[in-house]
Image: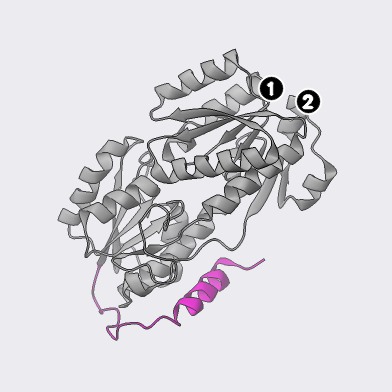
Amino acid sequence: MMDRRSFIGTIAGGLLAVPLATEAQRPGKVWRIGLLSGGARPPDGAPPAALRQALRDLGYVEGTSINYVGRWAETRSDRLPGLATELVGLKVDMIVTLGGPSAEAAKGATSTIPIVITGAGDAVSTGLIASLARPGGNVTGISEQATELSAKRLELLKEAMPRATRIAVLWNADDRAMTLRYREIEKAARVLGVTIQPLGVREPDDFDVAFSAMTREPPDAVYLVTDALTTLNRRRVIDFAAAHRVPAMYENGLVVRDGGLMSYGPDLADNLRRAAVYVDRILKGAKPGELPVEQPNRYYLLVNLKTAKALGLTIPQSLLLRADEVVQ
């Protein structure tokens, strides 16, 4: 397995092919990196550890050559434009965004400060960038293959439960990127011959409404689309699925390690480490609009056998053999 330093070096090497400005990192300069997230503020008030560690590996020392300024919307997407404006007013040198609404808010707040996006869904489809090869403007970073991934996750869930005909889908209906992902799930469902029970949520109280709907009309399985809102409420979904013995598909391994049944998606820490390389290249003079936007090149299938046993579900051996991690 490639270690963190080798991984960063490989990605950085790929980005070296992009023409860079001649201005080097200025000695004595303390860069101010803004972080904008729709999620909850962490206890330490710091950006994600994977991002900070990757920048340390690239030579940035907190308090000496780099400082972070974070703003968190606590799942209140209506707060994001104001928080983005705050970061612009603080004259940060760059904004790293977590999630689609955060990326849209940052782009709406500034056309000059570089923005590095992560977790923003399909950045082309949502209009954040012009294209993967030449994003244009002041935005670059990591995009996602929403169409292919949505279909693949539903296919894997159907493989685990061949007899499933009705699948409930929970997603943040206020997040355009996640709504596009839901639309792709609908398309995939038609191909696979299953019916979708749409359960859009916009705030924490909506989860109780969704749970009530699933109690009245029980689905054969649940599919949770991941964003800041659904991630913060994942424990409630896991507990509901366990109590009602409903298998569920998630989009990242964090939920499976918390007790969810299965997931398929990129490693979120990898994406943050890749974002750090973009931060480094831009601070050294690259123009964000000329840095090609990347997509994850590796996706991970995780299965929790302990949860499967509690649900009375036997996971097909063909699926287990393809799993990157099996939680016992």
Is residue 213 left or right of 47 when viewed as pictured?
A: right
Query: Which is the main secondary structure of the residues drawn in magenta?
Result: loop
In magenta, the rendered stretch is: 1-30
Q: Nearer the viewer, residue 243 or 258?
A: 243
Residue 228 x %, y %: 42, 40
For marks 2 and 1 on the same chain, the one whose residue lies earlier in the sequence? 1
Magenta stretch contains residue 166 = no
Up-down relation of residue 122 to residue 158 (above or below): below
- Would residue 36 be visible to someone looking at this image? no
Picture quarter with the N terminus:
bottom right
Is residue 203 left or right of 153 when viewed as pictured?
A: left
What residue is shown with label 1? 245
What residue is shown with label 2? 312
Residue 18 x %, y %: 41, 80
Q: Which residue: 25% across, 79% down?
A: 26
Up-down relation of residue 35 to residue 196 (above or below): below
Q: Nearer the viewer, residue 160 or 151?
A: 151
Residue 199 x %, y %: 50, 27
**Given the image, on which type of amino acid does mark 2 rest?**
Gly
**Given the image, on which type of amino acid does mark 1 rest?**
Arg
Badge 1 density bin: few <14, some 14–19, many ≥20, Cα 10 Å: some
Q: Nearer the viewer, residue 52 or 295?
A: 295
**What element does badge 1 sit on?**
loop
Q: Which residue: 66% across, 42% down?
A: 191
- CB atoms at circles 2 and 1 under 8 Å apart? yes
